[in-house]
Every structure is written in structure tokens, then in C-alpha cells.
Amino acid sequence: MWIAPERRRLSRWAVPGLALAAGVLVAVLLAADGRAGTGLVALAVLAGYALLLGYRRYEPALPGTEGFGTGHRARAHARAAALTGDVLTGAIVAAVIVQGLRGADIAPYAWLAALAGATYALSATFGGRSL
């Protein structure tokens, strides 16, 4: 068959699905507590994160780029930069969840999550082109 078996498995969507389910759960909990607006913002942040994770499922590896140079050190630097972005994005999403459930203001973290999402979308769209 022309489609590889690993491309057809539902397990590829387990993590994005879990992030979206967590967003729905947090939104329901916050709405039940009378904070529907905060719940919708948290749901939007987690839905965006699930979208990011779903999009990243199609990336087989980091693309080669001259931005970090060439060779082993350049690849290590590119992986380190990608991992740093992933960890910081996960921390921002976790802060939205924790602060929302604590009843604190999530606006600063929601803005950071939006900035991270917009930055990723722009870099994924225009990253391969020379400006």
C-alpha cells in the first residue's frame, strides 16, 4: 500500500487529542465556577497548542538550514533552539492552566501564548524563504 502504516495510526494524534481534551475539561471546570470567559481563553490556548502539536506530527526531522551554519554543531544548535522553544511554549500553556484554575489573571500568559503561536506560524510559513 502506498500509505505507510505508521501514517495511519491514531496514536499519532493521541497527544494533540489529549491537549484538546484538557482544554475542554479546563473550560468546563472554569465555566462551572462562573468564569466562562477565562475558560474560553484557556480553551483557545490549549486548542492552539493542540493544533501546533498536530502540525508538528508531519515534520519528520528538523530541516537543514544555513541559519545556524553547517555540520554537526549547527544541527545540535538547531535542535537546542527547537527544544528551547518547545519547553517555553509548554511552560506558558501550563501557566495558563494553573493560573486559570487558581482563579488568577491569565491575560499575560494568554498574550505570551498568542505571541508564541504567531511566531511559530510565521516562521513555519516563511522560514524556508530568504528575506
Image (spheres, rainbow, N blue to C red):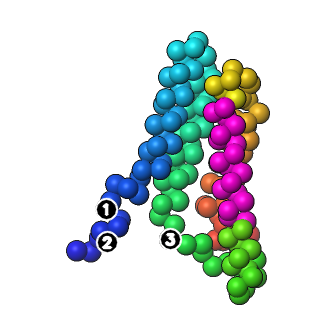
Magenta residue check for 79: no
Name which residue type carries label 2.
Answer: Ala
Mark 3 or mark 1, which is nearer the start of the sequence? 1
Percent position (x, y) of residue 13? 41, 52
Q: Which residue appears farthest toward the bottom when viewing the image? A: 71
Q: Residue at x 55, y 72 (%)?
A: 61
* Span of residues in magenta: 81-98
Q: How far apart are marks 2 and 3 (CA)?
A: 13 Å
Mark 3 or mark 2, which is nearer the start of the sequence? 2
Name which residue type carries label 3.
Answer: Pro
Name which residue type carries label 1.
Answer: Arg
Q: Mark 3 points at which residue?
A: 60
Image quarter (top left, top right, bottom left or bottom right) of the C terminus: bottom right
Q: Distance between the residues labelled 1 and 3?
A: 15 Å
What is the quadrant of residue 114 in the picture? top right
Q: Mark 2 points at which residue?
A: 4
Q: Distance between the residues labelled 1 and 2?
A: 7 Å
Percent position (x, y) of residue 64? 63, 79
Tell me the number on the disc at residue 8.
Answer: 1
122 is higher (above) or lower (below) than 18: below
Magenta residue check for 83: yes
Q: Residue at x 35, y 67 (%)?
A: 6
Q: Residues within 10 Å of mark 3 (few under 14, many from 20)?
A: few
Image quarter (top left, top right, bottom left or bottom right) of the N terminus: bottom left
